[in-house]
Structures are given as C-alpha cells and as structure tokens.
Amino acid sequence: MTPIDTLILARRVVPVAGPTRVLEDHAVAVRHGHIEAVLPAAEARERFEAVEVVELDDHVLLPGFINAHTHAAMNLMRGIANDMPLMPWLTEHIWPIESAFMSPGFVAEGTDLAMAEMLRSGTTCFNDMYFFPDVVAERVDAAGMRAAVGMIVIDFPTVWAANAAEYLDKGLAVRDAWRGHERITPVFAPHAPYTVSDEPLEKIRTYADEMDLRVHMHVHETAFEVNDALEKTGERPLARLDRLGLLTPNFLAVHMTQLTDDEIDHCARTGVHVLHSPESNLKLASGLCPVQRLIDAGVNVALGTDGAASNNDLDMIGEMRTAAFSGKLAGAQPDAAAVSADTALEMATLGGARALGLDEITGSIEPGKAADLCAVDLSAIETAPMFDPVAAVVYNASRERVTDTWVAGRRLLADRRLTTLDEAQLLDTAARWRDTLAGHARQPAARRSSE
Ligand SMILES: CSC[C@H]1O[C@@H](n2cnc3c(O)ncnc32)[C@H](O)[C@@H]1O
Ligand SMILES: [Zn+2]
C-alpha cells in the first residue's frame, strides 16, 4: 500500500483533459498537494492507504473553476448601483465610492468575502485586478486559495498610488515579495485603454516581455469605448495596443464585445487570450463577445465573473450557463451548437489555466497537477434524471450543490463548511460595510406609471 494524504472516490470524474470525457467510479489520489493518480475506485482502494478518504457517491468531481477576471473586494459593493451602462456606473457611482472608502481594510475584508463565495461555488483560483494587491496576496495566502494578483496601473491618482511610476514600483514590490510562491502569481493589470496612456503601457510591455509576465486589461468592453477612441484618435483601442507591442501570448483581453473579423484573426495570430465575462456584459448592456468565432479562429477563451458590483455574483456555474446560452446568439447567425456545455466547462477550467500560464499546474484532473478540485452533488430533484454530468452541471445544477473544494490538496470547503474562513464573521463584516456604504447606494428609478 502506498501512503497518500487524501483519496477522493467519486461516482463520476470529469478530468477536462485526456482521452476520456467522463470516468465512472473513479478515484483521485492526492499526495503533497498534487494528484498522484486517477484510477478506478476499486483499484485505488487496494493500492493506496490514505490519511483521509472522501466518498462522493452522488457527485461529479471536476477541476476547480478558474475565475479568470474579477475585482474580488468589490463584493462589498454588490448591488450598490444597478441597471445602468458601464460609464455612468463607473464614473458616477463606483469610482466616487472607491475614492472615498478604499483602504487596506476594505480590500482585506472584501477579498475574504469574495473568496468565501468563490470557494462555496467550486472556484479554486481567481485572476484579480484591484487596489492594494499586497493585501490581496496576503488574504489569498491565508485562505489557501490560488490567485493571480494584479499589479494595477491607471492614469489617475488613487489611495494606492499617485502616478504611473508609483503604480509600477509598488506593483513590482508586490511581485518581489511573493516571487516563487506556490499559489500566487503576479500579473500586470493596466485598467483599460481609455484610462492608461502610452508611456506606462510601453513600460509594462517591456517589463512583461523581460519577466515573462501576463498583462490583464479591460479591452473593447463597449461600443462607446471603441467609437470614442476612434473619434478622438482615429485608432481603435486594439490597434493602439498592437502598435504598442502588447498583443502577445502574455496579453489577457477582458470583455472584447466589439470585434471585427480581422481583429479576431489578429488575436489568433498574436496568441492573445480573451477573458469572457458574459453576465457583466449583459447586465451593463455592453454587448456580447463572439466566443465561438474566437474559439474557431484558434483563440483561447477563459471565463470570469467580473466584480460582484456588475454581475452581481462570483458564481462560475451560473457564468458557464450564461456563457453557453448567450454564446448561441453571439455569432453572425444564431447557432444552438455554439458554446456547448463542454466548451463552457473548458473555458471555466483549462481555458483559465492556459490564459494565466498555469496549465502545467492546474485546470484539469491529471497526475502531476495540483489537486485543485471541486465536487458537485447531482442527486437532488433539480438534476434528476441525470443523463450527462457535464450538461447537468452547466445547464441545471446550481452553486448550492457544490459540496467540497480543494486547493493544492487542502480541503477548503468540506461538506459545505469553509475551513479557513469564518462565515459568521464575514456576514458581520458585510453588514458593517452595508451600513457604512448605504448612503451611497443608487436609488432605483421610480416605477413607470404603466407598471
Ligand atoms: C484599477 S483597479 C480596477 C478598477 O476597475 C473597475 N472596474 C470594475 N469593473 C469594471 C468593468 O467592467 N470595466 C471597467 N472597469 C471596471 C473597478 O471599479 C476599479 O476601479
Ligand atoms: Zn472588470
């Protein structure tokens, strides 16, 4: 018998990579945070002696979800301003609140709240873009999650930095402090083409090339963004980023709802990754990313929720469903076969790992990778009868059915109980922030007389 730390026996395992789509009655053996073997359950019982055995008789075991675009601490602003488009939402509501209340404490408490929500819905890794990335990294380390932490840059001064040079210096200090950490990856995070000028973008390109680091940026989120840039400069934002040398396999373009056929081909040629956030795009009425056309052209597409202030949740199961449904109407013609359940699951797992350059480490259930896993119970009325576990998870399970989440072999959600974060305390924290921010919540418009 080989000693291991954990043996997870599941009715079904969906590895997302490898020759078999669904493995029936299989086991995942975990040792020192990594997947030692994936094998039939009966064989595993004979071969391994585990410190902990977890039996998941009614479940499907999946790779943990990778939320490829979020602003975790924005959980504290969930639902504070709704039913309006991006620019008024940002400039009249979110940015004024951020400028009045942003602090290391806001980010620590907001990030903890977000991580609790993510772990409770099967997410093991997230790609963050927010203030005080030093604090984000500390909270991620303490909670045991995996994250890409954004070295943010924006042209205007904030409580985090006064100018481009300071944003870069402080970002790089975060990178130095967490260099080599097993679960934390630094990523450049210039906010958007309309908020970051050429000079800092050129510096970012030079550093990213030298250090082989990813660059995470909102791009072509709305038609307004593209038309405004065209009017002011005669150049589309993506063309400008290309001119600045940023379009490489290190570039992660979030949103991309406005794309010409030539731009799609150019993304494929340059190896840019697209981070798709359909619920945020729908809620802000920004537009729809042509996901299937990008995938058909050879572009890697990952899935992210965006922040809870524009989504309004961090639920990757819901996001997969929305990606699949909206993807069927986002091409040149309606196409029910576009963005299938399998495609949505791949975007939410391996696609995210590829985007972050972590596909050697996570994103699928394969020996040698980190044991980043989640289990979904498919025994409830809501998923019965169950013909196909992938379709069940994407099209009709919900995040409440996630029972367990492991990151690097550590069980951070055990039978729906968080093991590193205190749920009751987080609810108190959220209530305290609600009282603090309540005066800034946007009042819904009055009912129309016809209603
Ligand atoms: C510089 S930290 C990140 C910055 O981004 C803002 N933000 C949140 N969601 C969006 C979005 O969908 N598009 C553009 N900017 C967004 C957030 O409020 C922070 O200020
Ligand atoms: Zn965003």
Image: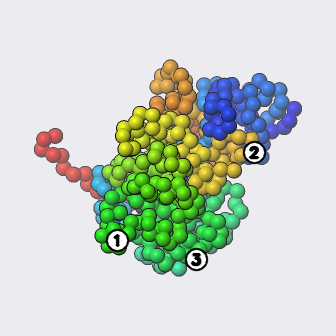
Residue 297 placed where, x, y %?
51, 49
Question: Residue 64, how many percent across, how many down?
Answer: 60, 43
Label 2: which secondary element: loop
Upstream in sequence: badge 2 or badge 1: 1
Q: Nearest the camera: 115 or 329?
A: 329
Residue type for callout 1:
Gly
Q: Quadrant of the N terminus?
A: top right
In the picture, measured across the screen, residue 162 lies left or right of residue 144, that is: left
Q: Which residue is mark 2?
A: 368
Callout 3 crowding tier (Cα within 10 Å): few <14, some 14–19, many ≥20:
few
Give the farthest residue toward the left.
Answer: 449
Name the residue rendered at 44%, 58% in the picture: 263
- Mark 2 or 1: the one toward you: 1
The location of residue 43, given as percent across then percent down, is 79, 26
Please name the residue that numbered disc 1 is placed on.
234
* Label 3 SS: helix
Residue toward you, 304 or 347: 347
For marks 3 and 1, give the one nearer the viewer: 1
The image's mark for residue 169 is 3
368 displayed left or right of 303: right
What's the colour scheme? Answer: rainbow
Residue type for callout 3: Asp
Quadrant that contains the C terminus:
top left
Q: Are marks 3 and 2 in contact (CB under 8 Å)?
A: no
- The CA span between labels 2 and 1 is 49 Å
Q: CA distance from mark 3 to mark 2?
A: 35 Å
Q: Residue at x 31, y 64 (%)?
A: 227
